[in-house]
Amino acid sequence: MNMKPGQTITHFLIEEQRQIKGATGEFSELVSDVVTACKVISNLVNKGELIGVLGSAGSENVQGETQKKLDILTNEVFIEANEWSGNLAAMASEEMDDIYMIPKQYPRGKYLLTFDPLDGSSNTDVNVSVGTIFSILRCDGEEGTCDKEGAFLQPGTKQVAAGYALYGPSTMLVLTTGHGVNGFTLDMNIGEFILTHPNMQIPEDTREFAVNMSNMRHWEKPVQRYVEECLAGKTGSRGEDFNMRWIASMVAEVHRILTRGGIFMYPIDQKMKDNGTEGKLRLLYEANPMSMIVEQAGGASSTGYERIMDLKPKSLHQRVPVILGSKNEVERLVSYHAE
Ligand code: AHM
Ligand code: MG
């Protein structure tokens, strides 16, 4: 493919489209609208309290979590940027109980879009990096079946594309359409995402782990064993010192792993089991898109027991345990689960 660092994301998408025989341009249009939404969100997040968008909205989402003003605003940004184009059959988001139907006045398309408009949003109040995660599926079902929840319940292996935007010191967009992973940086002066990180690859080995250690006592044995071995460092069975990071912002965490390797864990624990939940992170708009990106960059992603992208989703807001990152470390932890 004709891919050059410095090219705009629009240029990149059109070059990609040219590789696909019979491509109609609908997919490139859809990704462009998602990119527009991310630029608007970047601007909102960047202005912060100057425009009074920080703090709680005083409402709860379907999972009983307190919504931030920015959760609601960014969800609206995504809907407005994507509902009109005629490329989508329906949308689903962390912030909406049910799927979002395309309003009657607009044409319908064959794609489905799921997103978490502002992941890690509790970090906005303390001015720490947050992100947007999205996943694109195709609906090959018969007419009238695509704007139903069932159309979204496809395994991650069926994703056509996945990506995230990271609102950090600079705003980045990382995208896969199933042919590797490419990273773009937003040039605020011209309002364009520019290809700065072509063909991102996760190193196979790492000495850095990311997990919320405050849950350690609740974890299952294999995760406790893995982390204990990391903590034992040079004197322990691994014979090496490990470093730890926890930003509590999955997008920032995955981006670090794509840049320099590492393993990220949000495993199942006893507290979740007691509350009847199967994990913290959501399958359709957090775990699956991140798994596709990580696998496309040479990493691995698992619940500890199964490859995440092979799971058959049971519901829109299903939660799953997530272990992803550098291949050899993820495989080691999966092997501990198998023992
Ligand atoms: P959110 O979608 O409500 O923002 O929750 C997801 C976030 C992830 O970005 C992050 O990895 C995790 O929650 C942090 O959880 P914790 O606060 O338990 O450390
Ligand atoms: Mg989230």
Image (cartoon, rainbow, N blue to C red):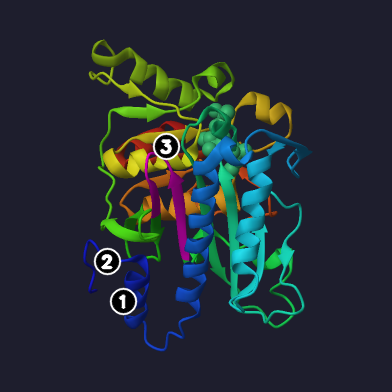
Q: Is residue 121 above or below residue 147?
A: above
Give the magenta part as a residue range. Answer: 161-173
Query: Quadrant of the image for the C terminus?
Result: top left
> Which amino acid, mark 3?
Glu
> Which amino acid, mark 1?
Glu
Circle 3 sits on which residue? 253
Query: Quadrant of the image for the N terminus?
Result: bottom left
Q: Is residue 134 left or right of residue 202?
A: right
Q: Residue at x 72, y 61 (%)?
A: 99
Circle 2 sits on which residue? 7
Circle 1 sits on which residue? 15
Foreground: disc 2 or disc 3:
2
- Looking at the image, do the residues carrying marks 2 and 1 touch, with CB atoms under 8 Å apart? yes
Secondary element at tag 1 = helix
In the rendered image, residue 220, in percent from the top left (x then y), is placed at 54, 25
Q: Residue at x 38, y 65 (%)?
A: 178
